[in-house]
Image (cartoon, rainbow, N blue to C red):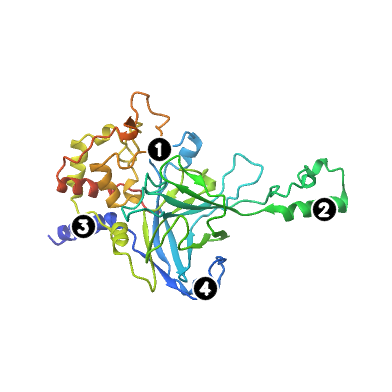
């Protein structure tokens, strides 16, 4: 009897762990300037690191056999995240293990770089719910800061100096003169790949090029892996921070041909700004745990035919009728999963899966709006929906 009780207790603890969300990150209040902070700054000694789990993004498989094979057994990654703020600027550090340093060259189209991104919920007319993870959704924009590890790349940089845009083999100079030419080109080269985007749904990702976001990001590698840093204003044209800032974190592994959607991604994580009033609604949504019965939820998924359009687990056959759900429990909040079940048209991916048959579109256009082809399950009772959400939250890769 004792062994049975111990086994039941272990199963209960395992289920609780599977349903749990990452705890909020505390952004320590400092008086220092954070606008140009780097990974080696002594200020990080004041911060406290929290663990955030990043899951393989699995909604749509890439059309790259080699890359898919390289990532077929991918597991979730643990990242350590710390934050500082001074009332005007928020600084984040993300540390993650990576045994290979992958840096993308400037003249190569078949190599890929390591990188990381931090996504923020953009300013909206009304608070909540949080945007769709990854790319936002209509009326719920996101701001994405992307940093890649790249080698020095020469760019004209707007100076129109054609004399330094010539291939060194065609300069007609040698010896010390050629060394001086190389030095001049190197001084004009860019070694930093930092981009900022705004998006309100898939295929809407648009780079912000007008300088309206004053951010600084960087990456540093050591034997344990990467440390990525980002500093950006708490408030600007795209983001209006309260005492709690929701963020999501992604990392790419260049050694495994990671790029675009081939990455590891966290769910929304609440960053509480020390000294400011915590936004309890954001914290509640980011940390909400599923309350349903997992076993009954699986039975409801089977009974309602979800596998007819979705790949449910990694071991199931690929389906092109709808996105794969094999890791949806890792990077989706309870609120998003619930909304997807009872209001499937609330977030509709603009554009079809290119591998799907033309007779099975993901949505139709009605009165100028995208309407999901998924059945509206709002007829289900609340308990059944809670059970399904609880089951979906268990769909996630093991942590390496």
3D distance between C-alphas at marks 3 and 1: 32 Å
**Which residue is located at x 23 percent, y 50 percent?**
390
How far from the left and from the top, in percent, is residue 27? Answer: 42, 68
**Which residue is located at x 47 percent, y 44 percent?**
205
Q: What is the crowding at mark 2: few (fewer than 14 residues within 10 Å), some, or many (at least 20)?
A: few
Q: Which residue is mark 2?
A: 179
Residue 361 to residue 88: above or below: above
Compare marks 4 and 3 and give the one earlier in the sequence: 3
Q: Which residue is mark 4?
A: 43
Compare marks 4 and 1 and give the one earlier in the sequence: 4
Left or right: where 163 falls relative to 69: right
Tag 3–tag 2 contact (CB < 8 Å) = no
Q: Which residue is mark 3?
A: 12
Q: Quadrant of the N terminus?
A: bottom left
3D distance between C-alphas at marks 3 and 2: 68 Å
3D distance between C-alphas at marks 4 and 1: 40 Å
3D distance between C-alphas at marks 4 and 3: 41 Å
């Amino acid at each position: 009897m004792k062994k049975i009780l111990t086994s039941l207790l272990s199963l209960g603890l395992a289920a609780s762990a599977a349903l749990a969300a990452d705890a909020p990150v505390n952004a320590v209040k400092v008086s220092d300037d954070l606008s140009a902070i780097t990974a080696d700054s002594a200020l990080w000694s004041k911060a406290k690191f929290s663990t955030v789990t990043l899951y393989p993004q699995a909604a749509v498989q890439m059309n790259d056999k080699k890359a898919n094979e390289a990532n077929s057994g991918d597991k979730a990654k643990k990242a350590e995240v710390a934050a500082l703020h001074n009332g005007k600027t928020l600084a984040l550090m993300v540390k993650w293990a990576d045994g290979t340093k992958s840096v993308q060259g400037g003249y190569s189209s078949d190599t890929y770089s390591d990188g990381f991104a931090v996504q923020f919920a953009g300013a909206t007319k009304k608070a909540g719910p949080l945007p769709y993870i990854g790319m936002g959704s209509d009326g719920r924009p996101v701001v994405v800061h992307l940093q890649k590890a790249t080698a020095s790349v020469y760019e004209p940089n707007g100076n129109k100096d054609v004399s330094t845009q010539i291939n060194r083999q065609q300069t007609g100079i040698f010896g010390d003169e050629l060394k001086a030419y190389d030095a001049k080109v190197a001084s004009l080269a860019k070694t930093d790949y930092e981009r900022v985007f705004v998006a309100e749904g898939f295929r809407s990702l648009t780079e912000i090029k007008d300088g309206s976001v004053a951010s600084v990001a960087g990456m540093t590698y050591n034997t344990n892996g990467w440390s990525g840093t980002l500093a950006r204003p708490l408030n600007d044209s795209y983001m209006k921070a309260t005492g709690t800032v929701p963020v999501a974190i992604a990392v790419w592994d260049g050694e495994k041909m990671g790029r675009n959607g081939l990455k590891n991604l966290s769910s929304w994580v609440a960053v509480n700004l020390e000294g400011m009033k915590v936004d309890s609604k954001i914290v509640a949504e980011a940390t909400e745990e599923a309350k349903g019965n997992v076993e009954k939820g699986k039975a409801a998924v089977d009974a309602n035919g979800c596998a007819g359009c979705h790949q449910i687990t990694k071991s199931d056959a690929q389906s092109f009728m709808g996105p794969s759900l094999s890791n949806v429990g890792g990077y989706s909040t309870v609120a998003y999963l619930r909304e997807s079940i009872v209001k499937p048209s609330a977030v509709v991916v603009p554009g079809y899966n290119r591998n799907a048959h033309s007779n099975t579109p993901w949505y139709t256009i009605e009165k100028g709006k995208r309407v999901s082809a998924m059945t509206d399950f709002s007829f289900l009772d609340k308990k059944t929906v809670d059970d399904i959400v609880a089951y979906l939250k268990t769909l996630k890769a093991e942590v390496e």
